[in-house]
Amino acid sequence: MADNWIKGAIKHPGALRKSLKVPEGETIPTGKLTKASHSTNPTLAKRANLALTLKKINKRHGGCA
């Protein structure tokens, strides 16, 4: 059931990476995500907050990071 909301929450895969100018294949640094989560752009802030949330969920349930 958790997979369904995650699938629905990510409407534009790669949009956060593109807006933060991080090349594909590299991980987005946590510092950039944290800074983006406080952005004045509401869409960017929401995407960064979702990325931070998904990062926490993955580690909490024993998945690979």
Image (spheres, rainbow, N blue to C red):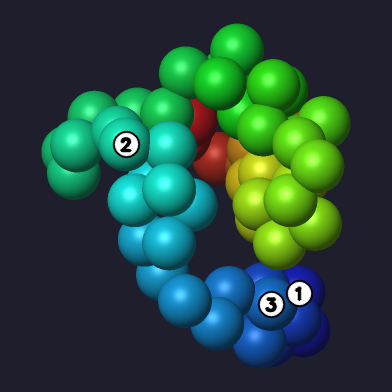
Q: Count residues near mark 2 (Cα–Cα under 10 Å), then give few for <14, some for 14-19, many for 20+.
A: few
> Can you identify the residue that label 2 sits on?
21
User: Which residue is drawn at the image coordinates 47% and 76% (left, top)?
Assistant: 12
Height in image: 2 above or below 44? below
Residue 9 tag number: 3
Height in image: 37 above or below 29? below
Height in image: 38 above or below 47? above
Q: Spatial distance from mark 1 to mark 2, Cα to Cα?
A: 29 Å
Q: Secondary structure at mark 3?
A: helix
Q: Amino acid at mark 3?
A: Ala
User: Which residue is drawn at the image coordinates 43% and 48% (left, top)?
Assistant: 19
**Residue 25 % position (x, y):** 17, 38
Marks 1,3: beta carbons within 8 A:
no
**Residue 59 % position (x, y):** 66, 31
Q: Amino acid at mark 2?
A: Lys
First reached walking from the N terminus: tag 3 or tag 2:
3
Q: Secondary structure at mark 1?
A: helix
Query: Based on the displayed image, in which of its 4 quarters is residue 7 positioned?
Result: bottom right
Q: Amino acid at mark 1?
A: Ala
